[in-house]
Image (spheres, rainbow, N blue to C red):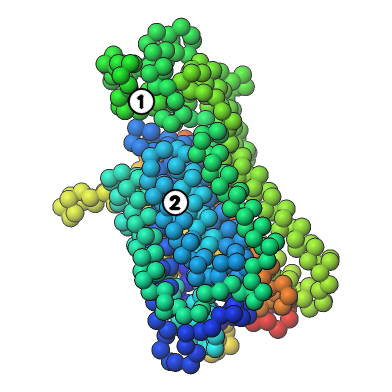
Amino acid sequence: MAGKPPGVNHSEMQSMPDPQQDSPAATPVTATSSRHPRGLYTLFFTEMWERFSYYGMRALLVLFMVDTVRRGGFGMTDEVATAVYGLYTAAAYLVALPGGWVADRILGAQRSVLIGGIIIALGHFTLAIPAVESFYIGLILVVTGTGLLKPNVSAIVGQLYPEGGARRDAGFTIFYMGINLGAFMGPLICSWLGEHVNWHYGFAAAGVGMLLGLIQYSWSCRHLGEAGRHPGHAEGARLRDKVVLAGLAAVVVGVIAVIGTGAVRIGSPLLLPNDVKDFPSLVTRVRTGGDAVSTRLRESLSEETRTLLGEADGQSGVAPELKMALVGEINAMMKEGAFATVTEAVPSAEAGPDEEAAAKEVEAHRQAVLTANRTAVDAAFPEAIPGKPTINPLAFAQNTKTVIVVVAAVYFLCVFLFFGLTPTEKKRVGVIVALFIGAAMFWSGFEQAGSSLNLFADRHTARVLPAWLFGGFEIPAGWFQSLNPFYIITLAPVVAAVWVALARRNLDPSLPVKFGLGLVLLGAGFLAMAAAAEIVVGGNQAWPTWLITTYLLHSVGELCLSPVGLSSVTKLSPPRLVGQMMGTWFLAASLGNLIAGLLAGEFHADAIDQMPWLYLRIVFTTVGTGIVFFIFAKPIKSLMSGVR
C-alpha cells in the first residue's frame, strides 16, 4: 500500500512520520535485530488505550448533547450539537501541528506523550462532571492532550527503526493494529455505560482507559531508550520557542478560565439547568406570575410539574426533579414560540426544485423563533437567569470553515508564486492540491459516522433484539461505531494483498484511481443510507444491516484512499517543504471533519422527509468527485513526474 503498512485507521495515517522526519538526536534501542524492540509494545498499548478513550467518548458525544435535559443530556438542537462535534474533531487534527512542534523544539516526544496523556485523562474525567462549563473545558483538555500525544507517539515508533525497510513497516503494522483494537473496544464499553446507565459514566470510562494507558506507559517507557527522549533540534529550546509555548499555554488557560467562570454561554438558545443561577427565585416568579412570560409558563405546566411546584419550598431549596421539569417545559414552550413571536411568515418546505433552499429557510426561521423566545425568557427572569454573551457554535463552525478554506487557498497560491519551485515541483504540488480537495471531500462524508449516522442508529434503527434470543436487549447506538475498526482490522490484509497481486500483473491502480475508488465507495455507502431513509420516511425503522453495509463500504473506501494519501504527499513534496505539505494533509482532514459536522446538522429530527435527498446529495457530490479523479487520472499521473 504505497510503502505504508496495512491495517491503518484513517484517523491515524495523518500522524505517521516520514522516514526523513525522524529526529536526528534519537538513538535507536536496536538497529539490526530481527525482533521488534520492546518499546514497540509500550507504544502499542499506550496508543490502544488512547484510541479507546477517544473513540469511546466520540461515540457518546452527539447522542449526549441532543438527549433531553430530563435524561441528563443538554437538549441541544441537532444543528448545534453536530457543529460542536465538528469543531471538536476538526481541532483534534489541527493541534497535531503545534503538538509536533512542541516536542521537536522543547519537550521531546517521550515527555510530550506523557504530558498529553495526563491532559487527555483529565479532560475525560472533567467531561464526567455533570455541568455545562465542565463539558466544554473537558473537550478543550482532550483536544490539547491529543495534540501532544497523537503525532509524537507515532514519531517514536519511527525512531525505533532507523534502518527503515520491511522491519519498520511490520512494526507500524503491529502498532496500528493496536490503534484499531482500541477504537473497536472503546465504543462497546463507553456506549453501553453512557446509553444504558449514565452519560457521565461513559465519559468516565474513557478517562479510565487513558489512565490505564498512562500507567503502563510510565511503567514500561524505559524500554524506549533514547528514542524520542530529547527534542529533535540539537540546539535545544531557544528563548523564542519558550515564549511561543508560554503564549500557547496562556491561550488555553485563558479560554478555560473564561468558560469555567461562566462569563460566556456556549450552545443553542435552549435553556440548560446550569443557566439558572437562582432556582428558588425562578420558582417564586412562576408561582406568583406578574408578567406575560411567567404567567404563560404557569398556565401551561403539566400536572406533574404543578405537583412538584406545589411541594417546593423556595426557602430550603429546589428538588432536582423540579429543576429538570421546569427547564424541560420552558424549552418545549420556546420551541413552540410561546413567549415571543417572529414577524416573518413560516416558510414552506414542500419538495421541489428548491427543496434544499426551502429546508434552509425553515431551519433559519426555527432558529429565529428559539432565539427570540430565549431573549424573552432571559428578560423575564433576570435574577434567576442572568444574561451573558453567547457563542453560537453553528456560526463559529461556519466561520472556521471559511477561514480554513481561505488559509489553504492563500498558502498554495504563495507556494506557487513565491517559493521558487522548479517546473517539476510545481506540477507535483498541483497534485497535492488535488489530493487536498479529494481528502477533504472524503472526510466530510466519512466523518458522518459519529454524527448523522450515529443519530440514525439511535432514532431510526431497529436495535432491540428478539426476547427469545437475548431477552429483548437493546443494542446501544454507539456500538455501530465499532464496525469501522473491525472492518479495518479484518480487511486491511485483504486489500493489501489485492494491490500486491495487481502490481505483479502491472495492474496496480494509480494514485488518482485509488482516490476515485475511495470516493465512489463512500458514495455507495450513502446510497444505501438513502434507501434506508426511504424506509424511515415510510414510517418504519430500518434494519441494522443498512448501517452495517454502509460502514463496510466506507471502510473499504478508506483503505483505498487513506493509506496512500500521506505517503504520496511526502513523496510529492519539495524536500524543503515536506513538513509544511504534511500540514496541509492535516488541514484537509480538519476541514473535512468540520464540514461533516455542518452537514450532519441538516439531518435533524424535524426534517425526516428530507433525509433521502440529503443522503443522495452526498452521493452525487462524492461519486461525482470520484469520477473526476477517474477522468483525469492520466493527466494527474503525468503531473507526478515519475513519483509512484
* Left or right, 55 with reference to 93: left
Q: Is residue 259 visible?
A: yes
On the image, numbered disc 1 is attached to which residue?
A: 323
Q: Residue at x 47, y 88 (%)?
A: 30
**Decide: marks 1, 2 in contact (CB < 8 A)?**
no
Q: Residue at x 41, y 56 (%)?
A: 121
What crowding class fits label 1: few (fewer than 14 Cα within 10 Å), some (14-19), or many (20 or more)?
A: many
Point out the residue furthest to the front here. Answer: 239
**Amino acid type, mark 1:** Lys
Q: Position of residue 205 (x, y in %)?
A: 33, 54
User: Which badge, 1 or 2, is on the more N-terminal residue?
Assistant: 2
Q: Is residue 631 visible?
A: no
Q: Secondary structure at mark 1?
A: helix
From what the image shows, is residue 486 above or below residue 66?
below
Q: Secondary structure at mark 2?
A: helix
On the image, numbered disc 2 is attached to which residue?
A: 123
Give how far apart the Cα atoms at labels 1 and 2 are: 27 Å
From what the image shows, is residue 160 above or below residue 461?
below
Q: Position of residue 245 (x, y in %)?
A: 62, 58
From what the image shows, is residue 297 above or below residue 62?
above
Point out the residue furthest to the left here. Answer: 468
Quarter where residue 393 is shown: top right
* Left or right, 580 with reference to 253: right
